[in-house]
Image (cartoon, rainbow, N blue to C red):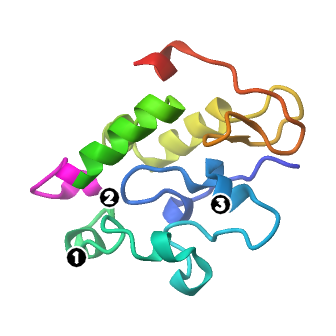
Amino acid sequence: MALIMLTDAELIAPCGMNCVICRGYLRKDKPCPGCRGDDALKPTYCAGCIIWNCLTIRTNRSGFCYECDRYPCKRLKALDKRYRTKYGMSMLANLQSIKERGLKAFVADERERWRCPGCGGTLCVHVGRCLACGTLRPTTQSDRS
């Protein structure tokens, strides 16, 4: 499986999730198009996401949560805590990186961070390994913060 190359914001969700590393996006049968993709092709729980459907996000300049007056809202804090605890990834850290360094730099960093050392494919955040070859995701210092 080749590493999917991101070129724009289409696969980075408003909450800071990199959809390329999501199990739904990586699955072979009925893959999810990502948060910014067609709602009709997403699982129901994704299409109904409170963050994705936030009017502020839909109308702000960047399309990311960090521009909101309520940032970080209760829903985003809960999502961030769950991902930090279960998957070693922070939505808030992702959004901070996008805000400070820009989307292009964030995507470049993500390509390297989630590249499978075994086959060069994409590591899945939800299962902690490459779905193509089974190589486990190495743990880094940033994963523990």
Q: Residues within 10 Å of mark 3 (few under 14, many from 20)?
A: many
- Magenta range: 65-74
| Mark 3 residue element | helix
Q: Is residue 62 left or right of residue 70?
A: right
Residue at 32%, 58% in the rendered image = 64
Label 3 belongs to which residue? 24
Residue for badge 1: 55
- Upstream in sequence: badge 1 or badge 3: 3
Q: Indicate the quadrant containing the C terminus: top left, top right, bottom left or bottom right.
A: top left
Q: Is residue 126 above or below residue 113?
A: below
Is 60 colored magenta in this rendering?
Answer: no
Q: In the picture provided, is 122 more to the left or to the right than 75?
A: right
In the image, farthest residue toward the top: 141
Callout 1 secondary element: helix
Chief SS of the magenta region: loop
Q: Which residue is mark 2?
A: 64
Report crowding for label 2: few under 14, some 14 to 19, many 20 or more residues within 10 A (C-alpha).
Answer: many
Q: Are marks 3 and 2 in contact (CB under 8 Å)?
A: no
- In percent of the image, x 67 and y 60: which residue is there? 25
For the point 61% across and 52% down, the residue is 22
CA gap, disc 1 and disc 3: 24 Å
Q: Which mark is residue 22?
A: none
Q: Are marks 1 and 2 in contact (CB under 8 Å)?
A: no
Q: Position of residue 7 (x, y in %)?
A: 61, 57
Left or right placement of residue 75 versus residue 117 in this view: left
The kind of residue tagged 2 is: Phe
